């Protein structure tokens, strides 16, 4: 069942979303060659907990050991933070963060450059971010979930990249993963109709190569099957009578 949020509940989610956005801003200067993904994870957890009442959504979620999912290069999602995973110039790093505040979760991921990256890696990141905002633009009354996926995949495929189809966005609220699922592909006017009070984690995951994936032996980290780079951008978005409202911004 899709859970619709009241105006008061949306304000609570927006407050949590501001903490989340500030967390991304806080860690960005630390994403440098020589840092470990565990260093970044510790920064995420400490900064979130420095805000009264806020906790990292992902810590212990389904047994996940970190406060953030931190994925490098060909890793698409769910990378486990580790002292052995050291950033180097030329890497791209996705930091996926959730914040639980006031009884509600918000969810946002961003892919960052570490040092000097290739033009090809930068283009992948740019196209993935553009596909996110193309999907958000379709978050208006009268549209359907399929409109979001169609808009996202149109941007991605025009650029010659692949949308990951094994993984989807989702509703988010009192629990991290709510209905409906939000695929990053689809057909216009298909799927659930958008309603005021819906809150969606929209998160295109885009591969420079093919769409196929595999899960590593740690049973968490999902990577591109062909070893190509992958980027991931995500916002939590509310459906309102006035159009989309991004909740995970400052």
Image (cartoon, rainbow, N blue to C red):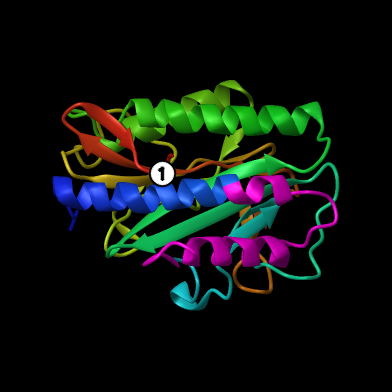
Return the x and y of residue 45 as percentages of the image width and height.
Answer: 55, 66
Residue 45 within the magenta-colored segment of the rendering: yes
Residue name at image x 55 percent, y 32 percent: 129
Return the x and y of residue 111 as percentages of the image width and height.
Answer: 63, 43
Q: In this view, does 157 lie to the left or right of 16?
A: right
Q: In this view, does 93 lie to the left or right of 198?
A: right
Q: Report crowding for label 1: few under 14, some 14 to 19, many 20 or more residues within 10 A (C-alpha).
A: many
**Quarter holding the C terminus?**
top left
Main SS class of the magenta portion in the image: helix
Residue 249 within the magenta-colored segment of the rendering: no
Residue name at image x 77 percent, y 62 percent: 36
**Quarter holding the N terminus?**
bottom left
Whether 135 is drawn above or below 226: the answer is: above
State the residue in front, 67 or 118: 67
Whether 180 is drawn above or below 41: the answer is: above
Return the x and y of residue 232 as percentages of the image width and height.
Answer: 57, 44
User: Which stretch is magenta?
Assistant: 26-55
Q: Is residue 43 left or right of residue 104?
A: right
Picture quadrant of residue 47:
bottom right
* Residue on which the image places disc 1: 248
Residue name at image x 73 percent, y 70 percent: 82
State the residue in front, 180 or 91: 91
């Amino acid at each position: 069942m899709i859970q619709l949020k009241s105006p008061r509940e949306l304000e609570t989610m927006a407050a949590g979303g501001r903490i989340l956005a500030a967390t991304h801003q806080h860690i960005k200067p630390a994403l440098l060659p020589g840092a470990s993904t565990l260093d970044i994870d510790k920064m995420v957890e400490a900064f979130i907990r420095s805000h009264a009442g806020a906790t990292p959504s992902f810590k212990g979620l389904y047994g996940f050991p970190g406060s953030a999912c931190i994925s490098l290069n060909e890793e698409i999602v769910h990378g486990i933070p580790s002292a052995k995973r050291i950033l180097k110039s030329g890497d791209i790093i996705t930091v996926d963060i959730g914040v639980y505040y006031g009884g509600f979760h918000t969810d946002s991921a961003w892919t960052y450059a570490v040092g000097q990256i290739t033009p090809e890696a930068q283009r992948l990141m740019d196209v993935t971010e553009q596909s996110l905002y193309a999907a958000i633009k379709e978050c208006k009354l009268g549209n359907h979930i399929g409109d979001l996926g169609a808009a996202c995949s149109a941007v991605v495929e025009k650029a010659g990249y692949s949308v990951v189809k094994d993984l989807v966005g989702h509703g988010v609220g009192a629990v991290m993963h709510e209905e409906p699922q939000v695929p990053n592909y689809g057909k216009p006017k298909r799927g659930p109709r958008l309603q005021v009070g819906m809150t969606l984690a929209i998160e295109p995951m885009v591969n420079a190569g093919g769409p196929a994936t595999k899960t590593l032996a740690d049973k968490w980290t999902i990577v591109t099957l062909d070893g190509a780079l992958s980027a991931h951008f995500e916002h939590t978005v509310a459906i309102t009578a006035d159009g989309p409202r991004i909740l995970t911004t400052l």
